[in-house]
Amino acid sequence: MSDALALVIQRAVRAERARIGISQAELAKRLSWSRSRVAAMETGARRIYAHELPELCRALEIQLPELLTRASAEDRRWLGVP
């Protein structure tokens, strides 16, 4: 996954988590990850890998296309996504 796409997904995951009102600890629990792993992923200290996307989307109860369309307008323009 490109660095640009990874950054947009990190931001989108953080925004979606906030939108649905769950903490990093709750997301970590849903993923069977540590809270620090979620925090590192959201800040970019840890990359998101393509094979993790389905798991992240299930934990956030959202489909990947929807997650991307909810990314900020600036991030979508940056990626060339309408």
Image (cartoon, rainbow, N blue to C red):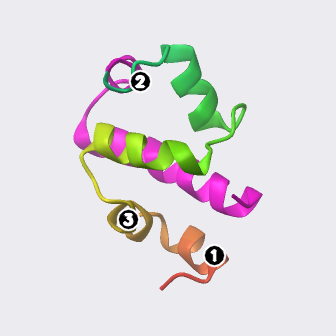
The one of 72 and 81 positioned closer to us in this rendering = 81
The residue at the point 49 percent across, 74 percent down is: 73
Q: CA gap, disc 3 to disc 1?
A: 13 Å
Q: Is residue 13 magenta?
A: yes
Given the image, on which type of amino acid does mark 2 rest?
Answer: Gln
Please tell me whether the stretch drawn in magenta is mainly helix, strand or loop: helix
10 Å crowding of disc 1: few (<14), some (14-19), many (20+): few
Query: In this rendering, would 7 be left or right of 57?
Result: right
In the image, residue 51 above or below residue 68: above
Tell me the number on the disc at residue 70: 3
Q: Does label 3 or label 1 sit earlier along the sequence? A: 3
Residue extending furthest toward the front? 51
Place of residue 59 in the rendered image (x, y in percent of width and height, measured from the top left): 31, 37
Q: Which residues are magenta?
A: 1-29
**Dots 3, 1 in contact, CB < 8 A:** no
Secondary structure of the residue carrying tag 1 is helix
Q: Does label 3 or label 2 sit earlier along the sequence?
A: 2
**Which kind of residue does numbered mark 1 sit on?**
Leu
Residue 48 versus residue 37 in the image, above or below: below
Gap in Å between the C-alphas at discs 1 and 2?
Answer: 26 Å
Reading the chain from its start, which is encountered first: label 1 or label 2? 2
Name the residue beneath numbered marker 1.
Answer: 79
Queried whether the magenta region covers residue 33, the answer comes back as: no
Q: Position of residue 58 (x, y in %)?
A: 30, 43
What is the spatial separation of the Cα atoms under label 3 and label 2, in whole angstroms?
19 Å
Q: Residues within 10 Å of mark 3 (few under 14, many from 20)?
A: some
Judging by the rendered image, the residue that carries numbered circle 2 is 24
Q: Nearer the viewer, residue 64 or 81?
A: 64
Tell me the element at label 2. Answer: helix
